[in-house]
Image (cartoon, rainbow, N blue to C red):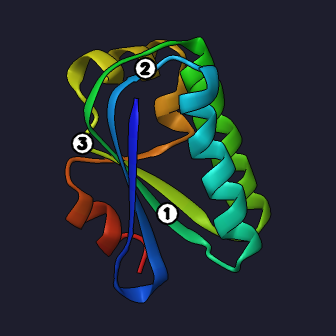
Amino acid sequence: MKLRQKELSGGIVLFEIEGNIVGGPDAMSLNDEVRKLVDGGKKKFVIDMGSVEHINSSGLGILIASLNVVRQAGGDLKVANVSSRVLDLLKITKLNQIFKLYNSVDEAVKNLA
């Protein structure tokens, strides 16, 4: 898994994830970065999953943990560009009711402003 991060206007942090989210040190880096940024005062996040091919239960746990950290700090986290395969898993686990999912990063950003 590759993780890229950039700051957008309005203090929104965009994470672009590429590859598989299957736990381990790579996937934990997302949670670590979210914690650091929340501690630094950031509260608005978008995760672009357009290049995520596969996610397992460990990966889902990392996303949930990140969402919890952000929400406990009074912020919000949106998820964009989910593939149909990942969306099916989110629906099966009912996590599509927990995460706010958007078809594009722009749409997610608009809903954070």
Q: Residue at the location (79% across, 60% down)? A: 72
Looking at the rendered image, the disc whose residue lies closer to the viewer, 2 or 3, is 3
Residue 111: image quadrant is: bottom left
> Which circle marks residue 91 in the picture?
2
Instruction: Of the two numbered discs 2 and 1 on the same chain, state the one appearing first in sequence.
Output: 1
Task: Identify the amino acid type marked 2.
Answer: Lys
Judge from the rendering whether residue 111 lies leftward or rightward of residue 71; answer left or right: left
Give the residue number, with chain letter if any, for mark 1: 45
| Residue 38 pos. (x, y %) | 70, 68
Q: Residue at the location (35% across, 86% down)? A: 9
| Residue 95 pos. (x, y %) | 53, 28
Query: What is the secondary structure assignment of the residue under circle 3?
Result: loop
Give the residue number, with chain letter if any, for mark 3: 81
Graded by Cα atoms within 10 Å as few (under 14), some (14 to 19) or many (20 or more), the crowding at tag 1 reads many
Does 98 sit above or below residue 45? above
Judge from the rendering whether residue 101 lies leftward or rightward of residue 28; answer left or right: left
On the rendered image, what quadrant is the N terminus found in? Answer: top left
Disc tally is: 3
Instruction: Of the two numbered discs 2 and 3 on the same chain, state the one appearing first in sequence.
Output: 3
Cα separation between marks 2 and 3: 15 Å
Cα separation between marks 2 and 1: 22 Å
> Which circle marks residue 66 in the picture?
none
Does 58 sit above or below residue 36? above
Does 52 sit above or below residue 79? above
- Callouts 3 and 1 close, C-beta under 8 Å: no
Instruction: Of the two numbered discs 3 and 1 on the same chain, state the one appearing first in sequence.
Output: 1
Query: What is the secondary structure assignment of the residue under circle 2?
Result: helix
